[in-house]
Amino acid sequence: MCQYNNDLQMYRSSFTIKSNCGLSTAAKEVGAAIVSVYVYPMSDGKNFVFSFTTSSDIDALRHYLSSDFLNYKIYRGKNVVFIQGIKQGHGMINSIISSGGVPLFPFVARGGTESFDFITYRRHLIDEVIDSVSKHNEIAFSSYDSLRNDDILSVLGRKNSVILTKDLTDIERRVIRKAYRSGYFSWPRDYRLDLMVSDFSLSKPTLLYHIRNAERKILSMIMDQN
């Protein structure tokens, strides 16, 4: 008999590893994140990967992807470059799935790191995944939070926002997140640049530069879709 639970407890976990794999190295060298929207685990530790990046440096991508991709194809789209191929995995997908977790795409490779998210119904399984991953990888960051049924929609929305913010630098991401959450974009404005100066130890012109740069990158991703 099918059972129904209308108040199921779930957990979302995020972790980032330090990485020198083909994707993260290529992302570093071309100066743009590589976003994997689908990864399928195959036999012998290999993964089928479908990714994209806004970099158009095809020669650099080919050079660095060849370090651990067994075969791949690169397709040039209108605004992005797509990467499809089979690469040697690092155990992340298998660690998540074997512990009963559900991978949340996209995964994001930046210069020297790769970030992953997954959902599980049991809190202790998060520790199992992290322990499994840490056997062969150096974890730079990990966290988790609890979810209820309705939270999953907001989680998926935040995951999609990764695509819009993928080309932001770390400082741009931190500045615009703080500005948004603190009311900088509200009317009337609840958070001013002089408060941000003390929070970030940066000058007003520098902060404004980072905000404007982040806005331009996010808007270009939105407007270029239309």
Image: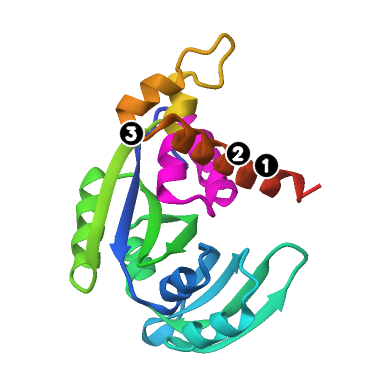
Q: Is mark 3 in CB contact (under 8 Å) with mark 1?
A: no
Tell me the magenta residue range: 149-175
Residue occupied by mark 2: 215
Residue occupied by mark 3: 200
Q: Is 64 on the left or on the right of 221, as rendered?
A: left
Q: Residues within 10 Å of mark 1 (few under 14, many from 20)?
A: few
Task: State the mark number for residue 219.
Answer: 1
Give the image location of residue 95, x and y in percent: 31, 66
> Within the image, what quadrant is residue 54 found in?
bottom right
- Coloration of the structure image: rainbow
Closer to us: mark 3 or mark 2? 3
N-terminal of the two: label 3 or label 1? 3
Give the image location of residue 200, x and y in percent: 33, 33
Q: Is mark 2 in CB contact (under 8 Å) with mark 1?
A: yes
N-terminal of the two: label 3 or label 2? 3
**Distance Cα–Cα, label 3 vs label 1:** 24 Å
Residue at the location (78% across, 65% down)? 78
- Quick check: can you spot residue 148? yes
**Distance Cα–Cα, label 3 vs label 2:** 18 Å
Give the image location of residue 35, x and y in percent: 53, 62
> Within the image, what quadrant is residue 82 found in?
bottom right
Asked if 178 appears above or below 127 in the picture, the reply is: above
Q: Name the kind of residue labelled 3 in the image.
A: Phe
Q: Name the kind of residue labelled 2 in the image.
A: Glu
Q: Residues within 10 Å of mark 2 (few under 14, many from 20)?
A: some
Secondary structure at badge 3 equals: helix
Residue at the location (53% across, 74% down)? 49
Q: Nearer the viewer, residue 55 or 5?
A: 55
Q: Nearer the viewer, residue 133 or 10?
A: 133
